[in-house]
Structure formats: C-alpha cells, structure tokens
Image (spheres, helix red, strand yellow):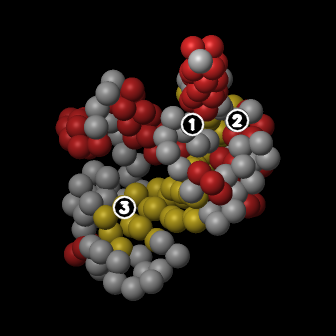
Amino acid sequence: MKTILLFIAVITVCLQSYAQNNVPSADIQIKSALLAAPKEKRDSCTVYGYSADKQFILLKQGTNELICVADDPSQPAFSVACYFKGLEPFMQRRRELRKQGMNDQQIFDTREKEVKAGTLQMPKQPAVMFVYSAEDKDFNATTGEVTNGYLRSVIYIAYATVESTGLPDRPSGKGMPWIMNPGTYRAHIMINP
C-alpha cells in the first residue's frame, strides 16, 4: 500500500511540475503572438515571449512599428498582445513592477507618479494595442492554433477625457467604442467588437 501511495505521489508531483513548466516552443509562441497583429503586418513584427525557465526574452526581431508579446505561461487563460513600439517603455515598466511583486493598483500608482515626473514617457499621439484572447481549452500549445478567440482594440491617448473625445466612459452599445481611465496617463479607447 505504501508503494502505491508513493507511486501516486511521485506521478502527481511530476505532472504538476510538467504543467507548471510547460512553455510552448519559440515557433509556436511567435505564431500565436502574431494572431494579435493585423495580417498584413505579421511578417515584420518584433515578438517577445518566454524561455523554458519562463524568462521574458526576444524571440524575433522585426522591422515594423509593432511589438507582439506571446502568452504568459504563468497566467490563466490565453492572451497575446501586439502594440505600437512607442508604448514599449510603458509596457516594459509594467513587467518590471509586476516582477517586483506589485499588484495592479500599485503599478497604476507608480507609473502615474513616473509619468508626471517625466521619468516614464507616454506617446504624445494615439497609440494602438490589439489583444487576442481565448480560454485555455481553446489554445493548442502544440500547434499554436486558437479556436473561439476574441480580438479587441485599445487606443492609448494619454489624459483624454469624455469631454475631449466625445466618447462615453462605458460601453453604450454592442461594438461601440468607449474611453477607459479617462483623464489619466493611461486613458484609452476600448473597441470590443
């Protein structure tokens, strides 16, 4: 009986370890990250993803204005993003603060202070981000295929308000754009088809 219990315990630990460390290949990460980019721009995007030990790394150097990020294997659900390169300092700072253990509100507050102090730059013009997401069960980590994926668009426009854009501060109808975090450094227009 002890042998059976020991065997079950070893198998359970091995399966949990495999599940926690299972990072798709670089090719699969690139393929799936590019799902967030407009089709005509995919071949030329820069792509970041994760090494086998889950370190954030450059997977593919691109030549256009878009940076794509592969799904984070340590987070639930599937989510990839592609954004204008002018947003990289903003995105990189979030990754740094998250690595330090900060929660979303702490990250928001820290970056706000840094933007106001001029040590973190936001683009002066509107800047786009595309996010493609799905449930875990709808992502095949072996092929990079996604079923039932959902693409939304975000346009960052620092300090924009309801008054400066004419947009509502919440969705007013299916597929209608709206402004989120109005009046802040991270104000952005949400477009959810």
Asked whether residue 90 is in view, the answer is yes
Side (left or right) of 133 relative to 26? left
Distance between mark 3 and mark 2 Cα atoms:
31 Å
- Looking at the rendered structure, the secondary structure element under dot 2 is loop
Q: Are marks 1 and 2 in contact (CB under 8 Å)?
A: yes
- Looking at the rendered structure, the secondary structure element under dot 3 is strand
Question: What amino acid is found at the position of numbered circle 2 in the picture?
Answer: Pro
Question: What amino acid is found at the position of numbered circle 3 in the picture?
Answer: His
- Looking at the rendered structure, the secondary structure element under dot 1 is loop
How crowded pointer 2 is (Cα within 10 Å; few <14, some 14-19, many 20+) is rated as many
Residue named by callout 3: 188
Q: Residue at x 31, y 53 (%)?
A: 186
Nearer-N-terminus badge (1/2): 2
Asked whether residue 165 is in view, the answer is no
Nearer-N-terminus badge (3/2): 2
Q: Nearer the viewer, mark 3 or mark 2?
A: 2
Residue 118: give x, y in percent of width and height.
Answer: 26, 36
Q: Which mark is residue 24?
A: 2
How crowded pointer 1 is (Cα within 10 Å; few <14, some 14-19, many 20+) is rated as some
- Residue 124 position (above or below residue 162): above
Side (left or right) of 87 relative to 116? right
Q: Quadrant of the N terminus?
A: top right
Residue named by callout 1: 73
Residue 135: give x, y in percent of width and height.
Answer: 57, 56
Q: Residue at x 33, y 24 (%)?
A: 100
Question: What amino acid is found at the position of numbered circle 1 in the picture?
Answer: Pro
Side (left or right) of 1 relative to 188? right
How crowded pointer 3 is (Cα within 10 Å; few <14, some 14-19, many 20+) is rated as many
Residue 55: give x, y in percent of width and height.
Answer: 56, 23
Distance between mark 3 and mark 1 Cα atoms:
26 Å
Q: Residue most toward the bottom? A: 173
